[in-house]
C-alpha cells in the first residue's frame, strides 16, 4: 500500500528533502497535495514531477501564473490565505508540516484534525500553541512524529523508556556561525553571514534563529510539549560537530545518546516510513574519521535569545506565544537589514516585559482564534518598537 503524502511548505528546504525521499521510494509514497507561499515556478515544477491532485499557493496574485504552468495537467490549483488549509484537507496518510513560522499553525492543526500521521518540522506550532496542538492531536488520535533532528533523536531514545526513569533530556546545538564570535563582533554581523550555517543548509528564518540560539530555545519549548518533559529536566549543550543530536540521562546513571550524520533526510525518512525504517542513501557515520566530538556550555550572555526562550518556557501561559511573535518580527527586520543582530533579543525581551508588566494579559488564550489574536497583538507591538527605532 502506497502512503498518500501531502506537504505543507513543499518548496522549502524540508519540503524539497521530503520530496527527495518520495523520489527515492516511489513504490511506497504518492504525493496528493503540495503547498507553498509564493514561488509559483518552483511549485509548478514540483507538481509536474510528482503529480499531486492539488496544489495550493498562499499568494493569490501568483495563482494565474501557477495555473498557466499547470495547464492541461488536471492538477487542481487553489490560492489565497486559506489555500494551505485546503491542502491539509486533502485526504492523505501522512502530512509533512514544513511551513515556516506561525503561518504553519492553522494548516497543520487542520491536518492533525484528520487523525493522520504528521511529520512535524514546523516548531513554531508547538511554541505558539503547544497545549492546544498536543490536545488536538490526542483528541483526534494523530501521531506527531518530530522531524526536527534533536526531537527525532529524542523520540527514538524515548522508545521503551518509562517517564519515571528520566533525569534530563539534553538537546545539542551546533552553536551556529557565530559560536566563536566575541560580543563586540556580534554587533556588526550581517544577515548574509547569519544565514551561512556551518553544518546545515536551511531556510532563512531558522538559519537566523540558529545564529542567535533562539532556535535551541524554541526547541526546548517544542520538546517540553512533544514529550511532556518538565522545563527543569530539559537542557542544551553546544556540540559543533552536530553528530550527537540528543542525550537522555536516566536516574540509574545511564546516558542514552543518538548519533547520525547531520542530514535532514534521516529524520524525514524516519517520520515518513514510521513505524517501518527506510534505508535512505545516507553514508554511515565514521567515528575514527571524525576523531573527536566536542561539547561546550552555551553562552547565554552572548546569545540572550536562548535565556529569553528558557524564561518564557518557565513562565508558560502566553509567554512562548509572545516570544515567537516578537522573534518572527525581529528576524524579518534583521533579514531586511532594518536592525542589527543584537537587537533581535532586545525586541523579544521588550515584548515579554510588556506582557509581564501588564495586568490586562491575565486570561491565557486557549482557542486557535485567541492565539491568533495574541500573536497579532504582539506582532504589532514588536513592529511599533521597530518603527520607533527607525
Ligand atoms: P524554508 O523557508 O526553506 O521553507 C518554508 C516553506 O514554507 C516554503 O515552502 C514556503 O513557500 C512556505 N511558506 C512560508 N510562509 C508561508 C505562508 N505564509 N503560507 C504558506 N506557506 C508558507 O524553511 P525550512 O528551512 O524548510 O523550515 C520549515 C520549518 O521546518 C521551520 O519551522 C523550521 O524551523 C523547521 N525545521 C527546518 C529544518 C531544516 O533543516 N531546514 C530543521 C528542523 C526544523
Ligand atoms: Mg533542530
Image: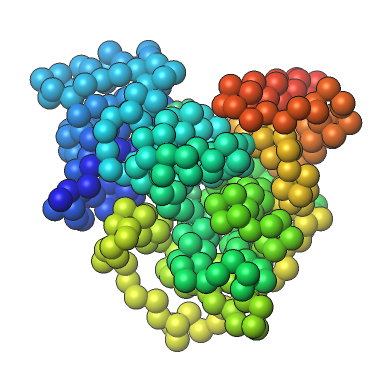
Residue at 36 percent of width and 55 percent of height: 271
Quarter of the rendering containing residue 118 = top left
Q: Is residue 252 left or right of residue 56?
A: right
Q: Residue at x 80, y 28 (%)?
A: 362
Q: Residue at x 27, y 17 (%)?
A: 65
Quarter of the figure with residue 44: top left
Q: Is residue 185 above or below residue 65?
A: below
Rendering coords of residue 256 (x, y %): 54, 77
**Color theme of the render:** rainbow
Relative image position of residue 382 (x, y in whole percent): 73, 26
Q: Residue at x 42, y 30 (%)?
A: 110
Give the percent coordinates (x, y) of residue 132: 57, 36
Left or right: 368, with 264 as reference point = right
Task: Name, please, the residue furthest toward the front.
Answer: 139
Q: Position of residue 276 (x, y in %)?
A: 28, 63
* Horizontal relation, residue 253 to residue 134: left or right: right
Q: Is residue 17 visible?
A: yes
Quadrant occupied by the C terminus? top right
- The answer to whether one can see residue 386 in this image is no
Amino acid at each position: 500500500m502506497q502512503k498518500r503524502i501531502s506537504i505543507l511548505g513543499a518548496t522549502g528546504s524540508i519540503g524539497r528533502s521530503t520530496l527527495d525521499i518520495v523520489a527515492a521510494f516511489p513504490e511506497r509514497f504518492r504525493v496528493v497535495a503540495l503547498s507553498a507561499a509564493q514561488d509559483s515556478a518552483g511549485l509548478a515544477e514540483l507538481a509536474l514531477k510528482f503529480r499531486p491532485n492539488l496544489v495550493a499557493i498562499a499568494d493569490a496574485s501568483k495563482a494565474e501564473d501557477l495555473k498557466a504552468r499547470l495547464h492541461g495537467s488536471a492538477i487542481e490549483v487553489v490560492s489565497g490565505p486559506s489555500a494551505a488549509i485546503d491542502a491539509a484537507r486533502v485526504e492523505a496518510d501522512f502530512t509533512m508540516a514544513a511551513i515556516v513560522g506561525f503561518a504553519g499553525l492553522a494548516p497543520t492543526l487542520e491536518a492533525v484534525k484528520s487523525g493522520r500521521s504528521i511529520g512535524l518540522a514546523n516548531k513554531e506550532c508547538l511554541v505558539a500553541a503547544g497545549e492546544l496542538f498536543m490536545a488536538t492531536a490526542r483528541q483526534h488520535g494523530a501521531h506527531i512524529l518530530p522531524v526536527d533532528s534533536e526531537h527525532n533523536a529524542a523520540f527514538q531514545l524515548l522508545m521503551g523508556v518509562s517517564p519515571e526513569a528520566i533525569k534530563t533530556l539534553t538537546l545539542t546545538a551546533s552553536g551556529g556561525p557565530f559560536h566563536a564570535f566575541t560580543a563586540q563582533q556580534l554587533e556588526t554581523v550581517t544577515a548574509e553571514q547569519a544565514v551561512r550555517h556551518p553544518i546545515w543548509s536551511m531556510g532563512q528564518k531558522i538559519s537566523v534563529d540558529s545564529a542567535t540560539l533562539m532556535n535551541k530555545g524554541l526547541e526546548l519549548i517544542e520538546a517540553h510539549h512533544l514529550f511532556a518533559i518538565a522545563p527543569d529536566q530539559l537542557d542544551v549543550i553546544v556540540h559543533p560537530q552536530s553528530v550527537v543530536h540528543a542525550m537522555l540521562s536516566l536516574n540509574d546513571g545511564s546516558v542514552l545518546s543518538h548519533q547520525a550524520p547531520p542530514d535532514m533526510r534521516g529524520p524525514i525518512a524516519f517520520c515518513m516510513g514510521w513505524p517501518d525504517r527506510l534505508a535512505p542513501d545516507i553514508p554511515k557515520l565514521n567515528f575514527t574519521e571524525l576523531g573527536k566530538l566536542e561539547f561546550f556550555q552555551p553562552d547565554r550572555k552572548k546569545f540572550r535569545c536562548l535565556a529569553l526562550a528558557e524564561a518564557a518556557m518557565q513562565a508558560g501561559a502566553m509567554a512562548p506565544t509572545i516570544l515567537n511573535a516578537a522573534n518572527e518580527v525581529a528576524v524579518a527586520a534583521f533579514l531586511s537589514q532594518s536592525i542589527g543582530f543584537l537587537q533581535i533579543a532586545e525586541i523579544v525581551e521588550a515584548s515579554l516585559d510588556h506582557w509581564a508588566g501588564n495586568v490586562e494579559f491575565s486570561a491565557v488564550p486557549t482557542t486557535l482564534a485567541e492565539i491568533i489574536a495574541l500573536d497579532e497583538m504582539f506582532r504589532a507591538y514588536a513592529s511599533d518598537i521597530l518603527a520607533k527605532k527607525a
